[in-house]
Image (cartoon, rainbow, N blue to C red):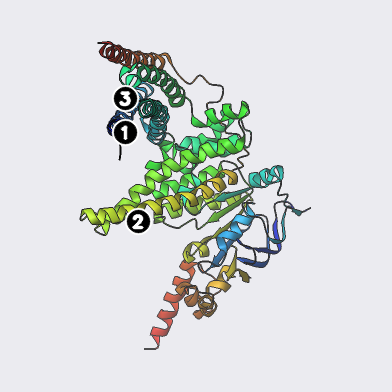
Amino acid sequence: MVLNTMELQKVSFGYRPGESTLREIQLEITCGSCLALIGANGSGKSTLLMLLNGLLRPTQGTLLYGGRPVDYRQRGLKELRQKVGFVFQNPDHQLVAPTVEQDLAFGPLNLGRTSQETRGQVAQIAEEFGISLLLQQPVSRLSFGQKKLVSLAGVMVMDPDFLVLDEPTLGLDVHHQSLLEGLLRGFQNRGKTIVYSTHDWDFLARTADQVAVLHRGSLVDLADPWRILSDDQRLVEVGLRPYPVGQVSQALGLKTLDQSIILKTLVRSIGESSKGF
Amino acid sequence: MLGPFEDHSLKNQENLSVKAFGLGILWILAMVSQSLVFSLVTVLVLAWFNQRWTQSAKVFAWVLASCLFYSLPGLAVVGIDLVQLVKGGSSDSVFHGHRLAAVSGVFVGTTSCMFTLLLNIPITKIFGTLGRLGIPPLLLELFYLVLRQIQNLVAFSQAVALGQRSRLGDSGLKTRWLGLTLGVPKLLTEAMGLVETTHQALEARSWGGTFRSLEDGEKVYGWSTISGEAALWLSAVGVLTILGIFCRMHSIL
């Protein structure tokens, strides 16, 4: 049995009868990988992410977790949500308790951990996220970036194997973005899996192992970030903006999105071509 | 053609209706302002004792909840008296005041107890206890969503008002009125959408119908709080009793 692997077998979903927000999605998310979902607005990214946490149930097809179909009864969903954490796009939608500490404790307490255990875990995660000073703050007083961090911490404290994030970098400044990137990298280094949706190509280039492209509810491409981001024609076709770094990388004959390598090669090639003048 | 008796009766009825209406308005205003002032004072004193200023969202939610809790039974009493006044033509019960004092006293006491409990026990703990007492999870979730909606509505109303002000929504009485008529439906529809999202947020973190809190099994309120609350309760009941006695004497005289 394959542990911690998520597989969507011809999964379709519609919010209303006869409507198809997602059409026959065939996708396997392997353990320890980082998958980015991209697509134009309304292409079904958030819907797909919600299916992974069991917040939505496929109208057709099967979702497998650890090689077994997801059990949509209460016990099965609790088990799934213990393993698959979901971070909402808007932190205001996710934060359900009045103070930061109470919100961070919400998930672990639901998993049946004792108050003492939970306090320890909350203190540890707060330390890791650099939000220890915010613990007694009401969530309504936090800045947007802080709310994003708290909502991520509230899921990470449950120690899931799978982390599903809807637009994690949306509205974050450079400082919070690099903080988030470091936290996600640390999470992945512990052998855990990350799935997120994004429109931030730089973030994607630095973090994702694989990119899935959704277009009008269908999965139209699944490849490594370089292949997706260097094909600007394809990006435009599915309603996305091209990525200049990918274009430059392709023009230089490189197969990387590492900006430092691209820059060095670019400088070198400019230097070489200027010798002729 | 109507005789003198019918004329007199109609006139009497009309006077009584006007009187009832005026009294009703006055009593409603008195009840609401009394509950507001008392709720605010209680909340501030308790917050001071507990040093829980940071939990302003919860405090605010409970000020509103207590106002409703406190005002509605009071309004029911007014309603009973007004029915008596209109149907029976007797204004005795309205002017005696003892009923108002008694009922108000009871509700001051109940509200005070509610405050003592609510401001000292995390809301999740209250829900947890209610759950153990056999209250259905669906009902508890409903309570929880209502509380969340109060917070959401406050936040949204501020955002909507700000958005309207930024586009000159406060430039005159007409634009303000327009802003209100546009803003209220917007708030309500947003709130309905948010209920769904809040439910999803609860479920996404393995919520299974039981609210648990970090303070489960811990002593959560101290003597200072209880003394403060008792002092408030006694003074409020004292004032109301004196008022009741005064009204009673006035009606006897």
Q: Is residue B100 visible?
A: yes
Q: Nearer the viewer, mark 1 or mark 2?
A: 1
Q: Which amino acid is tagged 2?
A: Leu
Residue at image coords 60%, 38%: B138
Q: Chain of mark 3?
A: B
The crowding category of the residue bearing disc 3, from other C-alpha atoms within 10 Å (few below 14, some 14 to 19, many at least 20), is some
Q: Which residue is mark 3?
A: B41
Residue at image coords 36%, 28%: B82
Q: Is residue A102 left or right of residue B62?
A: right
Residue at image coords 34%, 22%: B90
Q: Cβ–Cβ below 8 Å for labels 1 and 2? A: no
Measured in 3D between alpha carbons, the distance from the residue under mark 3 to the one under mark 2, in whole angstroms, is 34 Å
Question: Does A129 appear above or below A265?
Answer: above
Measured in 3D between alpha carbons, the distance from the residue under mark 1 to the one under mark 2, in whole angstroms, is 49 Å
Of helix, strand and loop, which one carries label 2?
helix
Question: Does B88 appear above or below B136?
Answer: above
Of helix, strand and loop, which one carries label 1?
helix
Q: Earlier in the sequence, mark 1 or mark 2?
A: 1
Of helix, strand and loop, which one carries label 3?
helix
Q: Residue B223 at x, y = what percent?
A: 42, 13
Q: Residue A97 at x, y = what percent?
A: 48, 38
Q: Which residue is mark 2?
A: B182
The crowding category of the residue bearing disc 2, from other C-alpha atoms within 10 Å (few below 14, some 14 to 19, many at least 20), is few
| Quadrant position of residue A45 | bottom right
Q: Which residue is mark 1?
A: B6
Q: Which amino acid is tagged 1?
A: Glu
**Number of marks in the image?**
3
Q: Chain of mark 2?
A: B
Q: Is residue A78 left or right of residue A241?
A: right
